[in-house]
Image: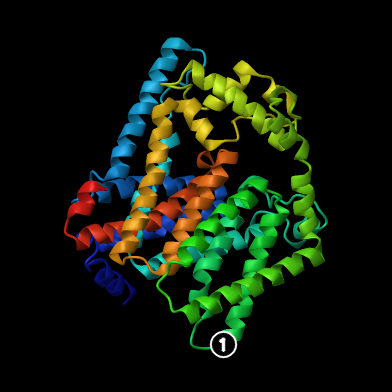
Amino acid sequence: MIYDSLQSYWRGEKAFGDASSSSLTVLLVLSLLYAVMPFTPFREEAGAAEAVLALLGLWVFFRHGSGLRWITPVKLLTLSIIICVVSWIFMMVDHPGLARSGPAVEEFIDKFLFLFIAIALAGDRRHVMVYLGAIGVAILLIPWTMGEGFSELKAGFAGERTNFGLNPIRVGLLFGMLFLGLVCLGPRFVFGKKQLLLRFSVWLVLVVFSLTCLITSQTRSAWLALIPAIVVGISFFLNFDLPGRAKAKICSSVVIIFFIILGAMQATGLSDVITKRFGSEMVTIERVYQGNLSEVPDSSWGLRVQMLVVGAQGFLERPLTGWGYHGGEKVLDRYGDIKKGSDGGFGHLHNSYLEILVSYGVGGLLIFLGLLSWGVYVIWKLKLAGFLHQDMYLFLLMALTFYGVAIAFDDDPFTVEGVILFNTIFGILTTYFYSLVKTENDGPLSNSV
């Protein structure tokens, strides 16, 4: 019965409906494993699921993706492979001792797995919500599946930085994204037909918990990235076509919840964590404002300023082809003693845009910015075409804003967690895009996007 149901579903009017139901079902399972396994004790085995997902997805996409085989992401993927190869060739010529044994195409290819995840989701809201729900649950359980559970959470309330067995910056990124998902999509769960109070209570607990984990991670980049994401969310929400009374109720509820969270933070001491964390960087801000970049301290933000200077030097030496694989690490070794002088050592520039620029030159950065721009454009087109509910539209915009700002402070697109979140956001917007192309029968949008 289950198989017949899946077969009936996949044979519907989907962009890849002519593919076999078994291959599409396997693709869906692989997509879930790829997104969830890195947040479990089976983290090391997740690479196998990713590899099979890429191979099967590639076959389904080019075998059955009529009208989609040369959309913008595929063009960018092709260009990224060319740029990686060209960068490697020039490094072999100019600096053979620093060059890798082969071009590092995987540094770009893994950013395009969303093309295959989108096939598995099939533009179906149920699949999208199940997919997001599975990732959300996996993130919620990280303190126990990867970390030390309640003892680590308790230490976080005492002012210690929590990492739950991961890098604390990754933790901040994950729980920041979870927070946005709960805020934007949570009302789907809350406003059910029954047990409204219970549903609301569970939702509120999850929102507070995600925000607590975000704060105790002491990841200022995630805190800062929430600000523009929330501003974008509010700006677009105010333009929604909703009755004035409905908007007033929602805004009032948000304000009440905000003050509840603010009071809880004050009572538990979490507000002090934020104050101390930002206060420790006032000297860095002052030196940068005065233009004394050579005198910034070796603090978190101070080191990032130093890395910015080093990265600029590395870029100016090789602006077109870059330094190839782990370019940031190479320029840190070449132009400064930041890596040698740190306790744990730095292997990147703590700025994703700068890292790409240094590693693969102007072309590499343009490809990444082009992909982000395509995502924003597609979200806008989907909303105009009526393919996105308002809450999903809001989530995608806020999530993309949050991610785009947060990665300016670290190398998230080169980490497992960062790549998963990127592919999640783009997988969702792309799956609806596939449906739009199918509906319009390869109309103007599929040719121009």
Residue 299 vs residue 43, the one in the foreground: 299
Would you say 343 lies left or right of 41 here?
right
What is the quadrant of the N terminus in the image? bottom left
Quarter of the rendering containing residue 147: bottom right
Residue 249 vs residue 426, the one in the foreground: 249
Report the residue that reaches farthest toward the right: 158
As displayed, is residue 315 above or below residue 141?
above
**Residue 292 x/y as whole percent:** 71, 25
Q: How is the image coloured?
A: rainbow
In what element is the residue under mark 1?
Answer: loop
* Residue that appears at 41% across and 45% down: 372
Count of marks overlaid on the render = 1
Task: Tell me, yes or no, if residue 232 can be seen here.
Answer: yes
**Residue 272 x/y as whole percent:** 80, 55
Task: Tell me, yes or no, if residue 138 can be seen here.
Answer: no
* Residue that appears at 77% across and 35% down: 283
**Residue 113 x/y as whole percent:** 39, 47
Q: Which residue is denoted by mark 1 in the rendering?
A: 195
Residue 254 vs residue 25, the one in the foreground: 254
Amino acid type of the residue that numbered disc 1 sits on in the rendered structure: Gln
* Residue that appears at 33% across and 38% down: 77
Quarter of the rendering containing residue 308: top right
As displayed, is residue 111 above or below residue 66?
above
Q: Residues within 10 Å of mark 1 (few under 14, many from 20)?
A: few
**Residue 145 x/y as whole percent:** 64, 58
